[in-house]
């Protein structure tokens, strides 16, 4: 089971990027998929996930309305579209996947729903830098 992230780069504020995660060794039909990011000096942040069984999605409040998670089962690729990028979005973005038994891994922390980092398989990360 492997994940290969790509699509990061340097983008101006207000711009957009589509991050890709190519999977091998498992089927996107059943696995849950997630996107995380980690900025220098900050904790890893869960951004979005999609359940494998029914395609239900979840987005973090910090990015909802600006990101869209999607997948192409036939190509074994899933995506994160990020729009209206701002300097605070500068980070290393990781894709991750969980088997059907674990699902998205959403958990309640201090009264808020967050994405657990306990995913079984991780990609290597792709750097997104937002700068003018």
Image (spheres, rainbow, N blue to C red):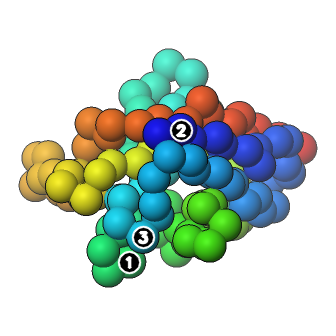
| Mark 2 to mark 1 CA distance (whole Å) | 21 Å
Q: Residue 2: which numbered mark, if any? A: 2
Count of labels in the image: 3
Q: For marks 2 and 1, give the one nearer the viewer.
A: 2
Instruction: Answer whether residue 72 is visible to the viewer in this image.
Output: yes
- In the rendered structure, are the residues bearing label 3 and label 2 in contact, judged by CB atoms less than 8 Å apart? no
Inter-mark Cα distance, 3 to 2:
16 Å
**Which of these two is toward me, 125 or 132?**
125
Quadrant position of the C terminus in the picture: top right
Q: Mark 3 points at which residue?
A: 29
Residue 23 location (% of width, % of height)? 57, 50
Residue 47 drawn above or below residue 118:
below
* Residue sitting at x 71%, y 35%: 127
Q: Quadrant of residue 54?
A: bottom left
- 3 or 1: tag closer to the N-terminus: 3
| 3 vs 1, front mark | 3
Mark 1 surroundings within 10 Å by alpha-carbon count, few (fewer than 14), some (14 through 19), many (20 or more): some
Q: Where is residue 49 in the image (x, y as percent from the top left)?
A: 39, 61
Along the line of sight, the residue nearer the viewer: 71 or 64: 71
Task: Establish if 72 lies above or below 23.
Answer: below
Q: Earlier in the sequence, mark 2 or mark 1?
A: 2
Lower position in the chain sequence, tag 3 or tag 2: 2
Q: Is label 3 in contact with label 1 (beta carbons under 8 Å)? A: no
Quadrant in which residue 117 is drawn? top left
Q: Name the residue under label 1.
A: 55
Q: Quadrant of residue 52 in the image?
A: bottom left
Q: Is residue 106 left or right of residue 45?
A: left
Give yes or no for contact between labels 2 and 1 (Cβ–Cβ under 8 Å).
Answer: no
């Amino acid at each position: 089971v492997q994940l290969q992230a790509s699509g990061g780069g340097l983008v101006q504020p207000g711009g957009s990027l589509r991050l890709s995660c190519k999977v091998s060794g498992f089927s996107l039909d059943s696995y849950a998929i997630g996107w995380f990011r980690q900025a220098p000096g900050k904790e890893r942040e869960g951004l979005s996930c999609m359940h494998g069984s029914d395609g239900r999605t979840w987005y973090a409040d910090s990015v909802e309305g600006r990101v869209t998670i999607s997948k192409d089962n036939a190509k074994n690729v899933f995506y994160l579209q990020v729009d209206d990028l701002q300097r605070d979005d500068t980070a290393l973005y990781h894709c991750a996947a969980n088997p059907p038994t674990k699902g998205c891994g959403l958990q309640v922390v201090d009264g808020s729903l967050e994405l657990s980092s306990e995913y079984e398989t991780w990609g290597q990360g792709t750097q997104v830098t937002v700068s003018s």
